[in-house]
Amino acid sequence: MARNAHPEVTRQRILDAARTLFARQGYERTSIQDIINELGDLSKGAIYRHSLRTYRSRYRTGQRHPTA
């Protein structure tokens, strides 16, 4: 598996796509698959890896929720 040289860029792309979809169709109606489709070039695994890093990072710094 190739390493992403710029994970912060990928993370920002995921967040931007999610925000766009949340605005368009609402949080409750947006799935991970919708975000994958919006991005067009990331796998479900890539999105989960970036999400897991975010949760771990926030947890270590005392923030319990990634949006905090």
Image (cartoon, grey):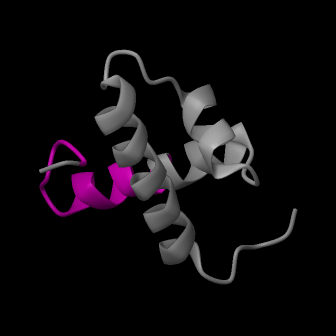
Left/right placement of residue 48 relative to residue 55 reads: right
What predominant SS class does the magenta segment belong to?
helix
Spot occupied by residue 49 in the image (x, y as percentages of width and height)? 59, 50
Q: Residue at x 44, y 66 (%)?
A: 12
**In the rendered structure, does residue 63 fall within the stretch colored magenta?**
yes
Left/right placement of residue 47 relative to residue 61 reads: right
Spot occupied by residue 55 in the image (x, y as percentages of width and height)? 35, 48
Is the residue 38 above or below the residue 32 in the image? below
Q: Residue furthest right?
A: 1
**Count of numbered tags:** 0
Q: Residue at x 70, y 74 (%)?
A: 4
Spot occupied by residue 40 in the image (x, y as percentages of width and height)? 73, 49
Left/right placement of residue 40 relative to residue 61 reads: right
Q: Residue furthest bottom?
A: 5
Q: Residue at x 14, y 52 (%)?
A: 63
Q: Specify the segment rendered in magenta.
A: 52-66
Q: Nearer the viewer, residue 18 or 8?
A: 18
